[in-house]
Structure formats: structure tokens, C-alpha cells
């Protein structure tokens, strides 16, 4: 059965979404059986589809998925490349064959904690889309006086520059005096939303760490700067939480499996990412 090309590219995790694949097609970067593809073209898994001249492997596209849980350190940016040469969250991920990792949501450079990556574009989009109501939980250390009236305002809603925002839950966790830890929950992921909500009340955020995304908590076995691949049960829970089909974990064999295991063993704990990477000398 033939599908629209943009859907196949998203299923294969070549593009992060169908919309991105549509932009590639409009820009003339995609070919179908030797001809420049146009929006509306359909193909199946056996057609020759290429992006920027590189063939796309579609035989198993969308039939399996993988998810990594990554403990992001402060100092990394959530992009594949950075014009300022800063370290990115993709720098230390394992290589994939015929697929690519898609980050599920973002964390700003000064925020650490749980960041999910998947090879399944549909799963990534569902987990990020506001309509699915997937919540995110953060541990936040604030500096300032916090009282019950402030907490109620944060839960009822505050008008920020980009509209109303609120925490669905705020719970005191630890600390005394001016520095206290709270756990807060959001149902969306707008830019710097946790920080901006606290700052709207005249309170400074001194540390921020994501500890949960939907049904996935930060695993206890991943130090800062390292990752672990989620189990089949955890993948099923994620799929069920957003109402999509369960799929089996992509089975690694041969050199791909060896390279993955080697990369996993060589991971280094990094509490803080290094500064800008030095450019090679001419």
C-alpha cells in the first residue's frame, strides 16, 4: 500500500515530522525513483527514495522503535549542531543505521535531567503535542520567600508574555530558609516556562532538573551525561499513554549491536558539559 512520501520519511525517523519532510520536498531535496519528488507523491517501502542524494532505508520503517533516556548535563544545547560550537545533546548518543534520534521536547542549556530520544517520529510527535496532555515533572531549587498564596497563584494561572501558564501541581520537597526545593508539574513545554513562572512571582530559580516525562521517570542507573535504552515494557507504557500502536524494540545484530555495546560501556559521567568546542586549525 502506497503512502505519502512525507509519512514514510517520518516513520523512518529521517525527518522529525511530516511537516519537516514536506519542507524538504518543497525545497527539492527529495527524489522518488530518480525524479524530484513533489508534494502529493506516494510510494511504498520498496521504492527508491533519497534525501539530498542519500538513499532512505524503508523496508522496516515504522515497524519497530527505540527510545533512549538521557541524563542531560548543564551546558548542552538541544540541537544537532550549534553555530557557537557549544556541545549538543546528540554528541554522545549511539549511532543508528538507517534511522536517526529525535529528541522529545527540549531543555534549555542551564537545565539538566531527563531527555527522551526515539527513532519513531509518530511517538515523538504524540509525546510533545499539547492535545495528548503528557505531563512533565521538574525538581526546582528556588531562592526567595515562597508562601501558600504564591503557590496557589502558580497553580491557578499566571499571564506570561506568550499567554496563560500554570503548574498543575507544586509540592515542597526539601530545604530551609531562602533556598528550597520543590517538585512542579507542567502539561506543556513552552520555552523556559518553569523559570518564567517562578520569576513572575519575584523568585529566582537557581537549579532546575527534569525528573519525569509522562510515565517515564529518570532511571536511577544513569549518571549525569549518560543514557540507557528503555525496555519493551517501558515502550509499551509510552505508546499506551498517547494512544498509539505498540511496536517491538528494534533488534540489533552483528556490527550494529557490537558498536552499540561498545559505545554504552565507554560512556563518561559529565556533571557539566564542556565549553565551546575548538575548531580545527587551518
Image: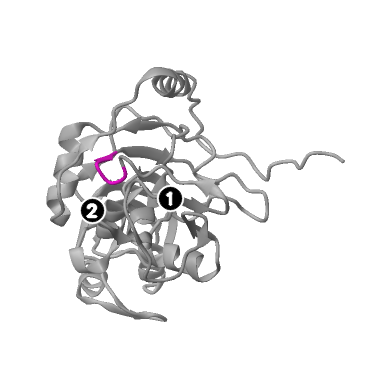
First along the sequence among labels 1 and 2: 1
- Residue that numbered label 1 is attached to: 14
C-alpha separation, residue under disc 1 versus residue under disc 2: 42 Å
174 over 222 or under it: above or below: below
**132 or 21: nearer the eye?**
21
Q: Residue furthest right?
A: 282
Residue 83 falls left or right of residue 229: right
Q: Position of residue 187 (x, y in %)?
A: 23, 64
Give the magenta-colored segment's residue range.
Answer: 61-65
User: Which is in the foreground here, disc 1 or disc 2?
Assistant: 1
User: Horizontal and vertical percent for residue 152?
Assistant: 20, 71
Quarter that holds the C terminus:
top right
Which residue is drawn at the image coordinates 35% and 21% (left, top)? 253
Residue 147 is labelled as none
Q: Is residue 62 magenta?
A: yes
Q: Is residue 182 visible?
A: no
Is 108 in the magenta? no
Along the viewing direction, whichever of 38 and 131 lies nearer the viewer: 38
Picture coordinates of residue 207, whole percent (x, y): 43, 51
Residue at left 39%, top 80%?
162
Return the residue at label 2: 172
Neighbor class of circle 1 (other Cα within 10 Å; few <14, some 14-19, many 20+) is many
Left or right: where 104 falls relative to 75: left
Amino acid at each position: 500500500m502506497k503512502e505519502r512520501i512525507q509519512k514514510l520519511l517520518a516513520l523512518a525517523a529521517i525527518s522529525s515530522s511530516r511537516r519537516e519532510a514536506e519542507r524538504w520536498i518543497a525545497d527539492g531535496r527529495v527524489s522518488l525513483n530518480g525524479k524530484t519528488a513533489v508534494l502529493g507523491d506516494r510510494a511504498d517501502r520498496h521504492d527508491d527514495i533519497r534525501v539530498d542524494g542519500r538513499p532512505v532505508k524503508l523496508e522496516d520503517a515504522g515497524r519497530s522503535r527505540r527510545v533512549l533516556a538521557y541524563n542531560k548535563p548543564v551546558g548542552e544545547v538541544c540541537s544537532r549542531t550549534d553555530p557557537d560550537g557549544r556541545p549538543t545533546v546528540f554528541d554522545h548518543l549511539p549511532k543508528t543505521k538507517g534511522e536517526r534520534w529525535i529528541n522529545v521536547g527540549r531543555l534549555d542549556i542551564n537545565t539538566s535531567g531527563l531527555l527522551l530520544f526515539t527513532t519513531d517520529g509518530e511517538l515523538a510527535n504524540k509525546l510533545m503535542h499539547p492535545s495528548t496532555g503528557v505531563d512533565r515533572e521538574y525538581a526546582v531549587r528556588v531562592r526567595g520567600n515562597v508562601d501558600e498564596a504564591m503557590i496557589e497563584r502558580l497553580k491557578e494561572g499566571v499571564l506570561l508574555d506568550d499567554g496563560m501558564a500554570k503548574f498543575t501541581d507544586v509540592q515542597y520537597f526539601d530545604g530551609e530558609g531562602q533556598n528550597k526545593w520543590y517538585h512542579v508539574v507542567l502539561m506543556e513545554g513552552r520555552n523556559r516556562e518553569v523559570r518564567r513562572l517562578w520569576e513572575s512571582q519575584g523568585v529566582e530559580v537557581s537549579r532546575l532538573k527534569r525528573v519525569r516525562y509522562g510515565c517515564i521517570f529518570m532511571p536511577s542507573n544513569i549518571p549525569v551525561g549518560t543514557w540507557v535504552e528503555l525496555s519493551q515494557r517501558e515502550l509499551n507504557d509510552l505508546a499506551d499513554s498517547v494512544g498509539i500502536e505498540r511496536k517491538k524494540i528494534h533488534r540489533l545484530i552483528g556490527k550494529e549491536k557490537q558498536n552499540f555495546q561498545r559505545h554504552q560501556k565507554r560512556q563518561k559521567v559529565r556533571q557539566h558539559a564542556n565549553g565551546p568546542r575548538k575548531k580545527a586549525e587551518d
